Image: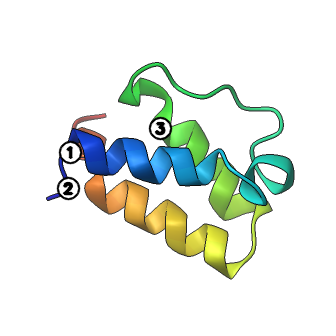
Amino acid sequence: MIGTEGIEALIDCAFSEPYRSMCLWSVRRPASDGNLSLVISALKNNGDMRAWRLANEIEAAWPEKGRN
């Protein structure tokens, strides 16, 4: 499992270009991992294959995903 720093690095990547303008233009950066499902969904629904892979990395690294 990836630690908190690893998840933050993945989120930083998601909110950088080209993903920010392609997928996440309407999503605020989450203050906590509570809104990661919105980020994952936006990457998968609006992005290309690289965005899909990034979404899968975030999902795999997110320890809380199974509890929601």
Mark positioned earlier in the residue sequence (3 or 1): 3
Find the distance from the CA under tag 3 to the CA under tag 1. 11 Å
Q: What residue sits 40% from the left and 25% below the top?
A: 34
Circle 1: is it few (<14), some (14-19), or many (20+) Cα within 10 Å? some
Residue 43 placement, left or right of 65: right
Residue holding disc 1: 63
Q: Estimate the x, y position of residue 54 in percent, counting from the top left.
A: 52, 66
Q: Estimate the x, y position of residue 29 in percent, counting from the top left.
A: 60, 28
Q: Which amino acid is tagged 1?
A: Pro
Q: What residue sits 29% from the left and 51% below the top?
A: 6
Q: Nearer the viewer, mark 2 or mark 1?
A: 2
Do labels 3 and 2 touch, CB within 8 Å? no
Mark positioned earlier in the residue sequence (3 or 2): 2
Going by the picture, which residue comes out furthest to the bottom? 49
Is residue 31 placed above or below 63 in the rendered structure? above
Q: Secondary structure at mark 3?
A: helix
Find the distance from the CA under tag 3 to the CA under tag 2. 15 Å
Residue holding disc 3: 36
Q: Estimate the x, y position of residue 67 in percent, counting from the top left.
A: 22, 36
Q: Which of the labelled discs sits on residue 2, or is there none? A: 2
| Image quadrant containing the C terminus | top left
Find the distance from the CA under tag 2 to the CA under tag 1. 9 Å
Q: Foreground: 45 or 10?
A: 10
Q: How is the image coloured?
A: rainbow
Is residue 35 placed above or below 41 in the rendered structure? above
Q: Secondary structure at mark 1?
A: loop
Q: Which amino acid is tagged 3?
A: Leu
Residue 17 placement, left or right of 35: right
Going by the picture, which residue comes out furthest to the top? 31
